[in-house]
Amino acid sequence: MSSLSFPSPRAAAAEPRPVLDPDAIFGHLLRISRALAGKLEFQAAIQAVSDELAEVLPHDHLDICILRRDDVHVAYEAGLHTDWGRHLHTVPVRRSPIRSVLLGDVPFLITGNAMEDPRFGFEGAFNDPIFSQRLRSRLHAPLLVRGEVIGAFSCSRHDADFYALEDVTIAQHVAEMLAPYVYALGAAEEARRLAIEEAEGRAREEGLRDGALRLTEELERERQRIGMDLHDGTLADLTRIARRLERLCESETAPREALEPIVDGLQRCMGELRQIIDDARPNVLELFGFAEGVEDFLGRALLEPRTGIAWRLDDASEGAVDALPAALRVALFRIVQEAVNNAAQHAGPSLIEVSVERVEEDGTPAIRIGVRDDGVGFMPMQQRRRVGGIRNMQTRARLVSAAFTLQRRADGQGTEMLLVLPVASAAGAVR
């Protein structure tokens, strides 16, 4: 890197400056270091530096320019307050009048009149404060951390040709003191920003989760209402019709051989309707708990010899599911229903197994539910005869923030659905 200086520094300073001996300069620098102690904001830090630096490096305007990761910079000012500090948006480095320092092209920058210096007046430069505040004399030193430029320290005066080359050394000493402090303060500020963003993200996630649970609860209420309407209306009507047909079959005038198939078909229809109603109103789940509800469902859905499918339930959850809010319990129950129905209708299994257990996932308590079958196996999405049920399970899992996977079993014999719900994020921990 090569340093640049023009025009000739302090060729015609407006007034003579007292010459300070090295001990006096060292004392001022030491007081600057002490003044920085305890300052937890950039603005407070730059003001402290400005107050202590007045005798060593007189200035009308002083600022710290800090680089950000996205190739922009922000400024904090003392003395005069300009658009550099008041600017509402960060400014790209390419528009900075001291970009040569920020990019590491020069070890310092000094000018006797920035209003006439072409280095400060290139096209697109954000240099309005130089002209509006008449900041002629300017001195800039980079803030370096491990050899990398993280910003710049700048002094300005209204007077032309105020700073000399000996002032560069003082500015560089101040920049050396400021650099690690600015770096640490920036890291702390970034940590605070990330913590705030994380907290806001958790709040949004919790809000979405609460909304999803309320939606799930409302859907469940509507489902149960439809089940009650079917029970009290449609099923009652079908029952009356079935009884009339049975009485006709018993009469001597009715063609019994013609009515019996109709009665049998009506009875089958009523049986299926009762199954739908029972599924819509999981009373066993509500009265006796999750494991009992799943066991009752398996017994009805896989009734032998009608289906020819054996089933097994392994509950090692110690009542963990029953400790969850009602909406979550029902959502998990519905996913199990869908998985079992999918396997029974499309996989041709001889055995369906359901497992419920408490586990630790990355140190967090969780509930893991598995539904396994020994059927035809896992087929690519485009070859599956029905994907609606899988999507229903995925949607329900997302609504309750559970991890859902559907895959071929490790032994290659059939399919396995796994659902993992972290109970720490489930509106109520496992008791």
Image: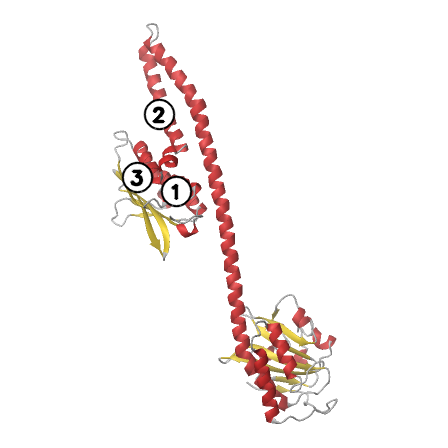
Q: Nearer the viewer, mark 3 or mark 2?
A: 2
Pointer 1 or 3: first along the chain: 1
| Residue behind mark 1 | 332
* Gap between marks 1 and 3 measured at Cα: 22 Å
| Vertical comparison of 262 with 302: above or below | above
Residue type at tag 3: Ala
| Vertical comparison of 373 with 114: above or below | above
Q: How is the image coloured?
A: secondary structure
Instruction: Name the image quarter holding the N terminus.
Output: bottom right
Residue type at tag 2: Gly
Pointer 1 or 2: first along the chain: 2
Answer with the quarter of the image where residue 334 lies: top left
Q: Is 231 on the left-hand or right-hand side of 25?
A: left
Residue type at tag 1: Leu
Answer with the quarter of the image where residue 227 lies: top left
| Residue behind mark 2 | 271
Pointer 3 or 2: first along the chain: 2
Q: Nearer the viewer, mark 1 or mark 2?
A: 1
Tell me whether the residue at label 1 lies in contact with that at label 3, contact meaning CB atoms closer than 8 angstroms. no
* Gap between marks 3 and 2 measured at Cα: 24 Å
SS for callout 1: helix
SS for callout 3: loop
* Gap between marks 1 and 2 measured at Cα: 25 Å
Q: Residue furthest top?
A: 253
Q: Residue furthest front?
A: 431
Q: Which mark is residue 368?
A: none
Asked whether 365 or 341 is in front, the reply is 365
Q: Which mark is residue 347?
A: 3
